[in-house]
Image (tube, rainbow, N blue to C red):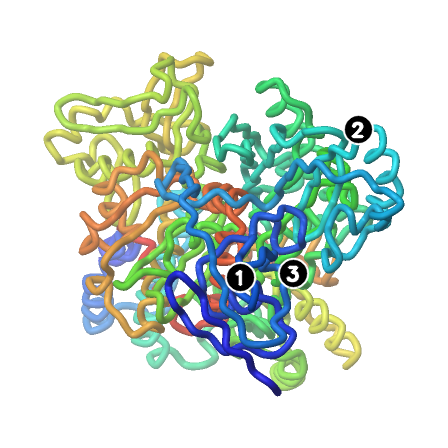
Amino acid sequence: MTEKIFNSIVGMEEENALKFAKEYLNDGGDPQKLLDVCREAMDEVGEKFEKGEYFLSELLLSGEIFKGIMDLTLPLLKESEVETIGKIVLGTVQDDIHDIGKNIFKAFAEAAGFEVIDIGVDVPEEKFVEAVKEHNPDIVGMSCLITAGINPMKRTVEALKEAGLTGAKIIIGGGRVDEEIKEFSGADAWADDAARGVRLCKELLGLGVEG
Amino acid sequence: MTKHKVTIMPDNIEIFVEDNTTLKDNFTEYGINFEFPCGGIGVCKRCKVNIMNDDGFEEALACQCKVKNDLIVEIPRREDKHSILASGLERDVTLDPLAKKFHMQLPYPTLKDNADDWSRLVGKNGVAPSLKVLQTLPDKLRENDFKVTVVIADNEIVSVEKGDTSHTLLGIAFDIGTTTIAGYLLNLKTGEEITQVSTLNPQIKYGADVISRINYAKTSQGLDRLHWEIINEINKLIEKAVKQAGYSSSDIYAVTIAGNTTMHHLFLKIQPKYLVSTPYVPVVTEPLVIDANEINISISSAGKIFVFPNIAGFVGGDTVAAALTAEIDKADKLTLLIDIGTNGELVLGTKEKLLSCSTAAGPAFEGVEISCGMRGATGAIDHISISNEFNYSVIGNSLPRGIAGSGIVDLVAELLKVRIINENGRILRPEEIKHPIGRKYKDRIIEVNGILSFLIEEKTASGQPIYISQKDVREVQLAKGAIAAGIEVLLKTYGAKAEDIDQVLLAGAFGNYLNEGSVCKIGLIPSVLEGKIRGIGNAAGVGAKLSLLSEKEYNRAITLSKKINYIELSAHPDFQPVFLKKINF
């Protein structure tokens, strides 16, 4: 059964994936194991994206499938049993309203075991500061699609520093970011696709990339 | 304020005009069809009219004659208009170029007629003198028996030349694209196009799209460098064009420049960096007329550069020029103009209301950033069809060197039809292909650097195979998704549906070769519009030419630029969800 679930996630069969997952849980399957299968499937989707075999719509769809299965599974797990590998505060920076990249990253980060607190789009630096104070994350993720978001990224990094919130690593993501923009903004890492972003988040926390 | 009645014969039109205004001002205001070849500065003496007074008729220049009492004016009938054709979208304009020359034989000064040299040239109420011209004027007049040629541009006398040089009067129109620069050398005396020149924009080494150029312009000396690159390349093109035709660059007196807003700013060495942060405002949208030597354009030292107006940060003078060519300001029925270059600019509307937007489509349709892509030049595969046979055509019938935008669109459309590409844009592996025709070509599915690709041809000019890769298909999806989403958002804002559109005009090099079916098959343009799409070639270039040949067209472009409203897609809440829907086939 877990193989069928794995294959229907990777094969983008949303209905089947959810149906099989429900059946598996109804038959007394281990929810933790189900999550692991989903994570493996998401890794596979990420790999296919990197090879060009999958594209944005597949990433979004797999994110939705994953979320659907998570919604079924999480209530069955005691909070202590839900293993997370780190906490990310995530938002699209001020002056940018695009959230495709952010949402895809969120799905993949969750699939990799991160707890993600999504603070939305067009987020001013004060709101990032507030959210970091409140949630004390390991990582702050800032997304932007358009170049208008580059200055706000720099401002947000500065605002976090000024507020003395230097505990979290900062990663920026989006189609327009690169090493130069990372240096400019003062972030710790950059990624222009979700799979790379998640890998870097693990590296930033000193976690192996094999999981 | 006193008003005077002016009766215009022979049509017997009565107009009421303010005291002390010129006939020219009033003719223009009341739309009386009358020409002022020199722009109304008193030089050409071609606007002669007859004014009736008690003693009969008296000749006067309409541009100089001020109305001080009621008048009867007779205007001569004129039939010496002639029309020229501009290639691309065929369209007639009356030759009235942005630079003009008039040969004059002036009376010698005498003790009785001792008016100064300047008034001898332009009359008492003519145009104000310019120092540059005055400094050489006296010798020029006297060394040539008072036979001189006056050069007029932008309503001023820019030069006085010895003898009769009126037969030599050239202009060059430029379309500065992010990827390609095209120049059209025109004979402004006859309206003929002498030659065309084009080249890749040398700024490409600092990035393929406008955003990377702007980022480079922000760096120390970046702006100087980008400006120098474009000026230097334009000078090279000018040199090449005049040499081909046996002229000299100093025979050029007027240049029109149509470019997107970033190219416009870089051409003028204006910092474009504020274009990339909200709210994306350009430094200037107004049109500009500048002296050629002010920005080191190597034409006649008296030459003028006419720079097209912009609409917004990402809809520039090239779109204005394309809209002029398309005459969208006269459209009775809903018209969609799509200018596909490195960005995709859209203009939708009728003569009543016009909306525009810009989509970051990327240069895929120009063959840029595609593995084997090239622009539509000799050696480019421009069409492909797949049935029981695999056929393609090459521009210039040579061995293929690469694939042009139109070829890429055809190929993707055909691969979709035979199900080698699925609706998500994935190239299937040979064993997955089920379609009977598709299966015939399963051996063409190859891997290039680990990425699945479809082989087009092995026998090529370079010996390297020509193929389309999975990554290329993704580029096409992003590009067509952006334009298709732009169309939908524009329609929604306008309050219309795709089927309400009466005609789609597709501008850009790609439009020259497009196959309507393919364009609809890949979803670049809604399929309900198949049959209504027309390629109009490099409409921006044609607009720049039309304006160079006709001051009226240039002024029309300026009016048009103010009429087109702009919608910012990057801040539009509908854009992203629509874009996601449009990415798939």
Residue at which label 2 appears = B144
Q: Which residue is drawn at 38% across and 78% down?
A: A77
> In the image, is B143 to the left or to the right of B314?
right
Q: Do the residues labelled 1 and 2 touch (CB within 8 Å)?
A: no
Q: Which of marks 1 and 2 is nearer the N terminus?
A: 1
Q: Which of B240 and B507 is in front in this view?
A: B240
Q: Residue A141: where, in percent of width, then height?
A: 59, 68
Residue B64: mark in rendering:
3
Q: Is residue B458 above or below residue A94?
A: above
The residues tagged by marks 1 and 2 sit, at their Cα atoms, a distance apart of 37 Å
Give the label, 3 or 1, closer to the camera: 1
Q: Earlier in the sequence, mark 3 or mark 2?
A: 3
Residue A104: mark in rendering:
none
Label 3: few (<14), some or many (≥20) within 10 Å?
Answer: many
Residue at which label 1 appears = B56
Image quadrant assignment for residue B109 = top right
Q: Residue B280: where, in percent of width, then height?
A: 60, 66
Q: Nearer the viewer, residue A93 or B89?
A: B89
Q: Which of B219 and B555 is in front in this view?
A: B555
User: The residue tagged with tag 1: helix, strand or loop?
Assistant: strand
Q: Which of B309 and B206 is in front in this view?
A: B309
> In the image, is B362 to the left or to the right of B150?
left
Which kind of residue does numbered mark 3 sit on?
Gln
Q: Residue B362: where, in percent of width, then height?
A: 48, 47
Which kind of residue does numbered mark 1 sit on?
Gly
Image quadrant assignment for residue B370 = top left
Q: In this view, does B396 lie above or below B262?
A: above
The residues tagged by marks 3 and 1 sit, at their Cα atoms, a distance apart of 20 Å
The answer to whether residue A199 of the structure is visible from this angle is: no
